[in-house]
Image (cartoon, helix red, strand yellow):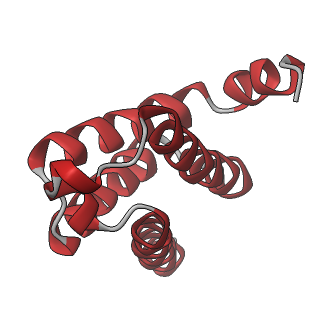
């Protein structure tokens, strides 16, 4: 059981890194610091929602428990900090991640009912 637990932790860490890198490609940290080059609030919301939906899919596939969700949130937070985002953005993105993965499939159900 310990070996499986270690594998899961490593997998969560790698996923969080990939998630943060994916986010940084669509919303680079430089944009977070430069008020003249900021993207629209709608665009940023779309980028964050797309990123967070990936986390929900990962959570559902791997059936993360309380500790797995906490690990994912912490790893994501640290990756965003390492990439150079502002503390405010890191907090908003991490809080969003935790809300999305906690709601899980309930969030997906409401998303699928909205007209596209």
Q: In which quarter of the image is residue 54?
A: bottom right
Count of number-bearing discs: 0
Depth check: 24 or 4 in front? 24
Depth check: 5 or 93 in front? 93
Residue 18 drawn above or below residue 35: below
* Residue 75, horizontal then vertical, whole percent: 30, 62
* Residue 9, horizontal then vertical, whole percent: 42, 70
The residue located at (77%, 25%) in the rendering is: 111
Q: Which residue lies furthest to the left in this view?
A: 87
The residue located at (49%, 65%) in the rendering is: 26
Left of 54 or right of it: where is 73? left
Left of 58 or right of it: where is 70? left
* Residue 64, horizontal then vertical, whole percent: 56, 49
Q: In which quarter of the image is the C terminus?
A: top right
Residue 107 drawn above or below residue 67: above
Residue 40 drawn above or below residue 90: above
């Amino acid at each position: 059981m310990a070996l499986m637990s270690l594998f899961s932790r490593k997998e969560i860490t790698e996923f969080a890194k990939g998630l943060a890198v994916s986010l940084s490609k669509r919303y680079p940290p430089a944009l977070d610091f430069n008020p003249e080059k900021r993207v629209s609030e709608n665009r940023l919301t779309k980028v964050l929602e797309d990123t967070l939906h990936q986390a929900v899919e990962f959570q559902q596939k791997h059936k993360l428990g309380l500790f797995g969700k906490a690990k994912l949130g912490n790893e994501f937070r640290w990756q965003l900090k390492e990439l150079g985002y502002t503390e405010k953005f890191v907090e908003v993105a991490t809080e969003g991640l935790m809300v999305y993965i906690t709601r899980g499939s309930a969030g997906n159900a409401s998303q699928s009912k909205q007209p596209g």
